[in-house]
Image (tube, rainbow, N blue to C red):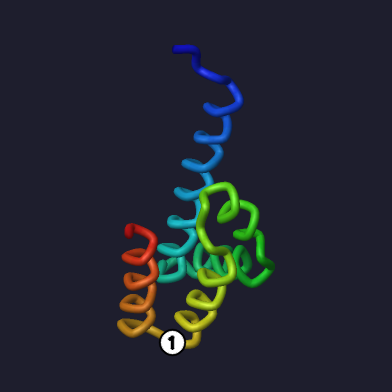
Amino acid sequence: MEINECEIDEKLAASIGRKLVIQAIKDLTSDDKDIKISALKFFAEKYHKRFCEQAGIPAEEIHASVLEAVKHLGVRRKKLVGDILKELDK
C-alpha cells in the first residue's frame, strides 16, 4: 500500500487546524488578558474559518457559539466554552 504525500499533508493540516481551534476556544476563559483578547480576535476577525474548514468543523456554528459564550463572564462563560468543546468531541 502506497502512502500518498498529499493525503498525509491534508490529514496533518486537519489535525493542526482542529487543535488550533480547540486551543483558541479554551483561551476564551484564560486568566491572562492578552491570551483572552487574542482568542477573541481569532474568532471576531474570522481567522478560525480556514482552520475549521481544514478540520471539517462547521466554522459558522463555532463562530455563533463563541459569540454567545463571550457575552457572559466567569462560570457561565466557562460552561458555554465547555459545551462548545463537548460538541467538537462528538
Q: What residue did someone put label 1 on?
A: 72
Residue at position x 63%, y 68% in the image: 41
Q: Residue at x 49, y 81 (%)?
A: 70
Name the residue furthest front. 1
Q: Which residue type carries mark 1?
A: His
Place of residue 20 in the rendered image (x, y in percent of width and height, measured from the top left): 50, 51
Residue drawn at x 39%, y 61% as measured from the top left:
88
Q: Looking at the image, is 51 positioned above or below residue 85? A: above
Q: Position of residue 17 (x, y in %)?
A: 53, 47
Picture quadrant of residue 59: bottom right
Q: Residues within 10 Å of mark 1 (few under 14, many from 20)?
A: few
Question: In the image, 8: left or right of 82?
Answer: right
**Percent from the top left, x then y, of residue 9?**
57, 29
Residue 74 found in image quarter: bottom left
Q: Is residue 35 above or below residue 56?
A: below
Counting from the top left corner in percent of width and height, residue 57 is at 51, 58
Q: Residue at the spot x=55%, y=20% of the render? A: 4
Q: Is residue 67 above or below residue 16?
A: below
Name the foreground residue: 60 vs 66: 60
Q: In which quadrant of the rendered image does the N terminus lie?
A: top left
